Amino acid sequence: MVDRLTHRILITGATGFVGTALLRLLEREHADCKVFPLGHGAGHRNAIDLQDRKGLDEAIREVQPTALIHLAAVAAPSDARNAPRHAWNVNFNGTMNLAQSMLHHAPDARFVYVGSSEAYGASFLSAAGPVTEDVPLRPMTVYGATKAAADLMVGQMAYEGLRAVRFRPFNHTGPGQSDAYVVSAFARQVAEIVSGKSEPVIHVGNLEAERDFLDVRDVVRAYARSAVLNLDAAPDQVYNIASGQPRKIRDILDTLVAQSGIDIEVRADPEKLRPNEIPTASGDASKARAELNWRPLVPFEQTIADVFGYWHRLCNAR
């Protein structure tokens, strides 16, 4: 049941890929909510630094949110691997600063923490199928470790009164995503070939890995719902956001190549291989389905077509 009170939703990371999709959804489907987006960097309006505790306190005291959706993070695993100290400062210390500020200045508000399925790490290696929220967090990457640590911290703070909801989303993509991520990287390369800007060759890493992919437009529906639903405050409010269907990276590339209508050569690039590669990762989202009435709605074939279309338009505009 949706609370009839006016919702005041504060969003960190609002200028990023997921934040932009969330803002569009809230504007379209939750027009009665008052939304307060916080971005990052001096060039952004309403910029905020998660290391600036005084600035966080002032923002939360001023807005007095009914919910905060925390998206801001060093989100690309490669960026976290290349600058681990910065990743820990943002993903862990920044989350601590924000959660403590919420406890002190908006204790009745919901704190929606967006973690990552990468927190499960080595647990995927022994999983017989999609993992539930009960499997151990055993991160194998810097990014996964920072998100797992913040996840556990937020869960612990829930016992001290933080009205937390924790999400562990699996891989998600959509138009507008950076080419630091595999689907968008493939789509950009294919679009450049179709536009005549590159030779018909794609450089790839491991194509045999299987991942649980979602459309970002489905993922943000879960975040929005958690901010407006009447949920009991309980430390176990943690949810996988997943399709439960692992997809081979090779099949995604094959779909994009087929959409191009061009004969494209695929070349292995050792520099694109990730360390600590997990063969298969997928999640069980039955808890989100039961408690949040959430399930993925966008067909993945549509997602792939939309990502390719985005990069094709961008290439032709240059």
Image (cartoon, grey):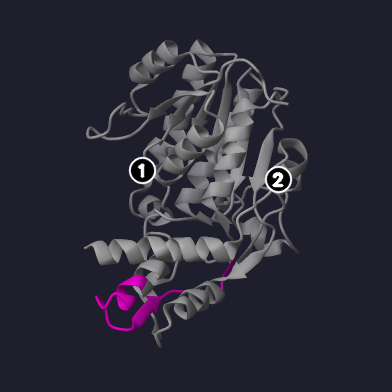
- Is 210 left, or right, of 291 in this rendering? left
Could you tell me which residue is drawn at 72 percent across and 61 percent down? Answer: 127
Q: Quadrant of residue 60 in the image?
A: top left
Q: Quadrant of residue 300 in the image?
A: bottom right
Residue 73, horizontal then vertical, whole percent: 42, 40
The N terminus appears in which quarter of the rendering? top right
Q: Amino acid at mark 2?
A: Glu
Can residue 269 be spotted in the picture? no
Residue 44, horizontal then vertical, whole percent: 27, 33
Q: Quadrant of residue 81 in the image?
A: bottom left
Residue 110, horizontal then vertical, whole percent: 59, 23
Could you tell me which residue is drawn at 45 percent across and 79 percent down? Answer: 257
Pick the front one: 14 or 21: 21
Q: Secondary structure at mark 2?
A: loop
Q: CA distance from mark 2 to mark 1?
A: 28 Å
Pick the front one: 40 or 252: 252
- Is 248 left, or right, of 55 in this rendering? right
Task: Tell me if residue 268 comes above or below residue 28 in the rendering.
Answer: below
Q: Which mark is residue 133?
A: 2
Q: Amino acid at mark 1?
A: Arg
Which span of residues is magenta-colored? 191-211
Q: Secondary structure at mark 1?
A: helix
* Residue 192 painted magenta: yes
* Residue 124 painted magenta: no
Read off the residue under disc 1.
85
Task: Tell me if residue 39 comes above or below residue 82 in the rendering.
Answer: above
Q: Nearer the viewer, mark 2 or mark 1?
A: 2
At label 1, counting other C-alpha atoms closer than 10 Å, the crowd grade (few under 14, some 14-19, many 20 or more) is few
User: Considering only order in the chain, which callout, 1 or 2, is on the residue closer to the N terminus?
Assistant: 1
Q: Which mark is residue 20?
A: none
Task: Tell me if residue 234 comes above or below residue 175 in the rendering.
Answer: above
Task: Tell me if residue 129 comes above or below residue 291 in the rendering.
Answer: below
